[in-house]
């Protein structure tokens, strides 16, 4: 389409008719003086002149100069050729196409012909025999006759060219309009934006001879390509035009197409050197998001520009319809997805690690992303990765980010989400190889005025950039996530406080308060069911000396090792607690003194044999313990009495040399 309406193929019949009616030789040239269609029979004198290099150069220089003058003055011109003949040059300019008709050549008289022969016979090697032959083929006409013939030819030429041009142009317009209407009418209500962009791109390239194009949209600081097509498609994938550029500002303000082919202006736009022109068509109305159709290296007639502008208006309405439809469908999906997602997260409320994984997996599913991560604040200065999806957990398990640093750290600090189309362009950060695209979303998780974490999503499965609808959906999800995380943290804190209230922080064993509560319960149970209940109190021998010689840090290590070894020697029903500095207690339900003694001895031997010597100054070879045992009901039926008697038995063990177990017997007092 858009073939040259002044192509010589459209004038072959006209050339023949005009040559016959005017009885002259007629040829057509383009604006650069290149012959498009020579006459059917060439003038014999000109044939001889152009047969030698010198004459050919001289003649074609004359032709080009005369054509240039006729086009510049837009008037018919009669000029004398190097052969002494006169030719007329009739310019025809239609649209941005130029064609020149050359008619002749004429001698004013036979005398003029003979004068040329006398001066140039030797130069062009013309024999006397050749002169008679040449004289039979020349045209003779005085100036007035040439003028009459040229005017007649000019009128006929002008009418004929306009008729051919109009027929060609209106035929093309009809065909093009029919094609446009046919294509646009096939854009059904269930079509996608991508399909519409593809169809219209193909149509523009075919019907308007567009070199390259891009549909682009506003991204705050400028406009970026969302759908490139044509010869420079690969380059236009990363096309960006600053909003403060004159050409873009003019389009936005006027709402009209703007064209620029000024080299200096294009250089200011920082475009590729191969771009020689840019044509921007607005695709928006008042109060709607700025979108554009941009044509590159394409010159258009005024009517072509208007036609494309009308197509842009139609596309704007279709796109608005599609966006409204998609918004409705997406909102419906959002509500369904959020309802399901929130239901799933409720099930993991009491299990933080499972909750973290569920949040990231659900967020990636909702936004159709391949990768996601959840970071939570661990202190006033740091964020820590709690869960990832689509990435290697080992790579990020210890990853911490300082608040205020990096993209995630700034999002946390500023409490404002970021939806990035191109990280390299927007943040001057090189995209890491593990990410397929440069687009991502980083979303703060807020509870009131407090920010508790960051949710990151990257790499849309489709390879596209993230859009506003993705951010809106994640915003809704983030509101619930924030509440769930805060609730989970309160639950975990409550459990942790409960655990801390009954456990010893160094060894993880039950503390003295819990030990006393359980001892009372077990004594009452044994009394109710007429069962035995034994108590063993264990004390590390010479522990103060160990601390003084090896240090308290090393002493803490001994306490932890003793705790571990005692724990390994007990049953699941036994209650093991740390009740003092180096003093431990074991409640053994349904256990008499003899059984308790064997358990205590097993513990004592295990500690003596299994704690390896790592100390340097402490004088003893082994770590040892002493134990005292009492039992209910024989040694008491209250916690105080049972503890008192176990302590007495422990004191006897110490007095008898340590590293031993003594069972309390009243008769030994």
Image (cartoon, helix red, strand yellow):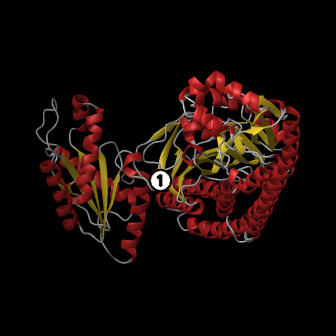
Query: Residue at 16% of width from left, 59% of height from top?
Result: 602
Q: Is residue 88 above or below residue 182?
A: above
Furthest residue in direction bottom, as rendered: 529
Query: Residue at 87% of width from left, 36% of height from top?
Result: 147
Would residue 274 be visible to someone looking at this image? no
Q: On the rendered structure, is 650 left or right of 499?
A: left
Point out residue 188 in the picture as x, y percentages from the top left corner.
73, 71
Residue 268 or residue 632, whichever sits in front:
268
Query: Residue at 62% of width from left, 50% of height from top?
Result: 228
Tag 1: Cα neighbours inside 10 Å, few (<14), some, or many (≥20)?
Answer: many
Q: Is residue 57 above or below residue 417?
A: above
Residue 440 or residue 605, whichever sits in front:
440
Q: Is residue 481 above or below residue 116?
A: below
Label 1 residue SS:
strand
Residue 568 or residue 303, whichever sits in front:
303
Point out residue 342 in the picture as x, y percentages from the top left corner.
61, 66
Q: On the rendered structure, is 47 left or right of 523?
A: right
Rendered image quadrant of residue 377: top right
Residue 299 or residue 543, whichever sits in front:
299
Point out residue 282 in the picture as x, y percentages from the top left corner.
79, 47
Would residue 419 be visible to someone looking at this image? yes
Furthest residue in direction top, as rendered: 119
Q: On the rendered structure, is 581 left or right of 666?
A: right
Q: On the rendered structure, is 256 left or right of 498?
A: right
Task: Identify the residue under disc 1.
Answer: 387
Point out residue 499 in the picture as x, y percentages from the top left corner.
46, 54
Query: Residue at 65% of width from left, 41% of height from top?
Result: 35
Q: Dividing the image into 4 quarters, which one contains the N terminus?
A: bottom right
């Amino acid at each position: 389409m858009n073939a040259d309406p002044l192509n010589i193929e459209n004038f072959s019949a006209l050339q023949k008719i005009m040559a016959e009616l005017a009885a002259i030789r007629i040829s057509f040239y383009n604006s650069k003086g290149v012959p498009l269609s020579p006459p059917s029979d060439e003038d014999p004198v000109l044939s001889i002149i152009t047969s030698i290099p010198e004459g050919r150069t001289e003649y074609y220089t004359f032709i080009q100069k005369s054509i240039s003058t006729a086009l510049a003055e837009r008037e018919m011109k009669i000029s004398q050729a190097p052969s002494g003949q006169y030719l007329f040059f009739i310019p025809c300019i239609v649209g941005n196409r130029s064609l020149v008709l050359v008619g002749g050549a004429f001698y004013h008289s036979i005398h003029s012909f003979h004068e040329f022969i006398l001066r140039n016979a030797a130069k062009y090697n013309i024999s006397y025999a050749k002169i008679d032959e040449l004289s039979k083929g020349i045209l003779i006409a005085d100036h007035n006759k040439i003028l009459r013939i040229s005017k007649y030819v000019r009128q006929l030429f002008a009418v004929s060219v306009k008729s051919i041009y109009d027929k060609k142009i209106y035929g093309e317009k009809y065909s093009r309009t029919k094609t446009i209407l046919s294509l646009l009418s096939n854009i059904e209500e269930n079509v996608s934006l991508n399909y519409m962009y593809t169809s219209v791109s193909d149509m523009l390239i075919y019907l308007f001879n567009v070199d390259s194009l891009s549909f682009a949209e506003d991204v705050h600081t400028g406009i970026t390509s969302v759908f490139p097509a044509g010869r420079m498609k690969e380059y236009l994938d990363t096309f960006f035009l600053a909003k403060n550029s004159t050409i873009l500002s003019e389009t936005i303000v006027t709402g009209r197409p703007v064209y620029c082919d000024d080299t200096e202006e294009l250089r200011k736009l920082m475009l590729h050197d191969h771009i020689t022109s840019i044509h921007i068509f607005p695709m928006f109305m008042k109060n709607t998001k700025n979108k554009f159709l941009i044509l590159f290296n394409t010159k258009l007639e005024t009517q072509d520009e208007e036609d494309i502008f009308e197509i842009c208006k139609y596309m704007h309405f279709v796109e608005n319809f599609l966006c409204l439809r998609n918004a409705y469908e997406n909102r419906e999906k959002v509500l369904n997805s959020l309802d399901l997602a929130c239901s799933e997260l409720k099930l993991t409320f009491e299990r933080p690690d499972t909750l973290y994984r569920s949040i990231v997996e659900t967020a990636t599913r909702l936004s159709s992303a391949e990768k996601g991560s959840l970071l939570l604040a661990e202190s006033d200065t740091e964020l820590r990765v709690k869960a990832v999806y689509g990435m290697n957990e080992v790579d990020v398990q210890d990853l911490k980010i300082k608040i205020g640093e990096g993209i995630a750290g700034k999002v946390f600090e500023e409490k404002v989400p970021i939806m990035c189309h191109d990280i390299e362009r927007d943040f001057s950060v090189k995209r890491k190889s593990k990410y397929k695209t440069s687009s991502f979303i980083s979303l703060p998780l807020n509870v009131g005025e407090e920010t508790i974490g960051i949710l990151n999503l990257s790499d849309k499965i489709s390879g596209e950039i993230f859009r506003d609808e993705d951010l809106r959906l994640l915003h809704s999800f983030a509101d619930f996530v924030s509440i769930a995380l805060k609730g989970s943290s309160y639950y975990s804190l409550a459990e942790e406080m409960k655990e801390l209230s009954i456990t010893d922080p160094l060894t993880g064993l039950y503390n003295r308060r819990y030990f006393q509560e359980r001892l009372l319960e077990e004594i009452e149970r044994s009394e109710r069911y007429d069962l035995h209940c034994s108590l063993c109190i264990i004390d590390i021998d010479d522990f103060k000396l160990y601390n003084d010689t090896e240090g308290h840090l090393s002493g803490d290590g001994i306490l932890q090792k003793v705790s571990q070894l005692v724990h390994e020697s007990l049953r699941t029903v036994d209650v093991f607690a740390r009740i003092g500095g180096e003093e431990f207690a074991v409640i053994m339900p349904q256990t008499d003194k003899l059984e308790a003694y064997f358990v205590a001895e097993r513990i004592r031997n295990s500690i003596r044999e299994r704690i390896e010597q790592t100390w340097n100054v402490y004088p003893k070879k082994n770590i040892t313990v002493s134990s005292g045992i009492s039992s209910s009901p024989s040694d008491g039926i209250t916690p105080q009495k049972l503890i008192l008697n176990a302590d007495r038995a422990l004191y006897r063990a110490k007095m008898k040399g340590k590293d031993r177990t003594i069972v309390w017997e009243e008769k030994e007092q």
